[in-house]
Amino acid sequence: MINTANHPLLPINLFEYEQRAKSHLSQMAFDYYSSGAWDEVTLRDNRTAFDRIKLLPRMLVDVSKRDLKVTVLGQTLQLPLIVAPMAFQCLAHESGEVATAKAAAYSGAGMILSTLSTKSIEEVAATNNSTDSLRWFQLYIHKDKGLTRALVERAFAAGYKALCLTVDAPMLGQRERDKRNEFVLPSGLHLANLTNMSGLDIPHYSGESGLFAYFAEQLSPSVTWHDLEWLQSLSPLPLVVKGILRADDAANAAKCGAKAIIVSNHGGRQLDSAIASIEALPDIVAAVDNDAAVLVDGGIRRGVDILKALAYGADCVLIGRPILWGLALNGEAGVVHVIELLRAELDLAMALSGCTCIQDIDSSLVRYNHS
């Protein structure tokens, strides 16, 4: 792994990573990673919502020492960051999810592996150098419940520490860039968790996204709250529910046994004009009232964004697309550098806000500007 410190050719922020990643990816891959649903209103608002949050820093605090560690579902992270579940990471780099997992573990961050990964549950688990690493498995419930059960059993056997059920995709949002590109996995890439076990793969349809077709054919649109009990019966793994934007849904999830809730609009890729995740966060934190951990994703591009999310009550944040930009540029080392940039920015933002540890970050630091 390269030394990422002060390298003159490396990007200096996550926005620069995205710009450089364009030249390292095919048009189909870049559009798949970067696009949102329909007019991409929510995709843009995820970012601009952070700009509307203003900070009220504390002064004359001894910030000579700072501690970024947090505990999520009993596991310690060196910073409040988990890599979000993202499909098809081998589109960015041949090592795909394996490189991402190694980088997350090296950096003291967590990782959630997607059902639709291009490296298998077992391949990614084999990169785990420590039983203390936070690694969860993201799950879509397929129409074939036997297949869903098998995925859960494999994740448990491989040592994953939680199941992360995505609930905001009963059908796939219409991503028009994917539709125009007729998105399909290139030759040699497959659904590593599914192809060998069931023969499933992303189909090719003229005039349509292959992923859209896959969701329509294979995933169950009939999942309800009752399925959470069934899912929890399959293993002793704690359940994390991802894709919640309403306070009543959050309260329901906690009541149904979820140990953590991820406030998310799927990166603006599902229902366009859905509320920005960060704007939904405070009401959900209030509704859950410490009955479950609350995490948030969507639009986080600076360490100061992480500070704002924590001030709004999040226990931890998820980072998605920037990880892919780092992976595309420089594999494992690129992902490490993306995480290190965020770590350094958060550390500086804490010092400038008068916070010596994550527990010092509270709602008194933030004001929302509606204009």
Image (tube, rainbow, N blue to C red):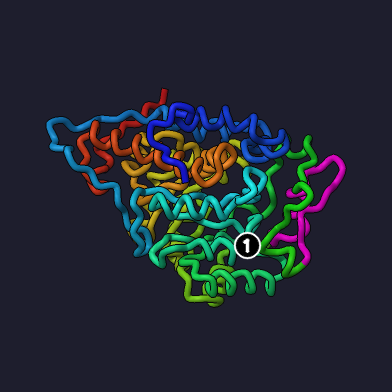
Instruction: Judge left or right: residue 365 versus residue 23.
Output: left
Q: Please tell me whether residue 298 is drawn above or below residue 14 in the rendered image.
A: below
Taking the magenta stretch, the answer to whether it contains residue 204 is yes
Instruction: Judge left or right: residue 65 versus residue 206.
Output: left
| Percent x, y of residue 54 | 33, 28
Identified at 62% across, 42% down, the residue is 269
Instruction: Judge left or right: residue 161 versus residue 89.
Output: left
The secondary element bearing badge 1 is classed as loop
Identified at 52% across, 32% down, the residue is 17
Q: Please tell me whether residue 78 is drawn above or below residue 274 in the rendered image.
A: below
Disc 1 target residue: 120
Identified at 67% across, 45% down, the residue is 91
| Percent x, y of residue 51 | 42, 28
Total numbered labels placed on residues in the image: 1
Closer to us: 355 or 22:
22
Instruction: Judge left or right: residue 283 versus residue 236.
Output: left
Q: Residue furthest front?
A: 2
Specify start and end residues of the magenta stretch as a single range.
Answer: 199-221
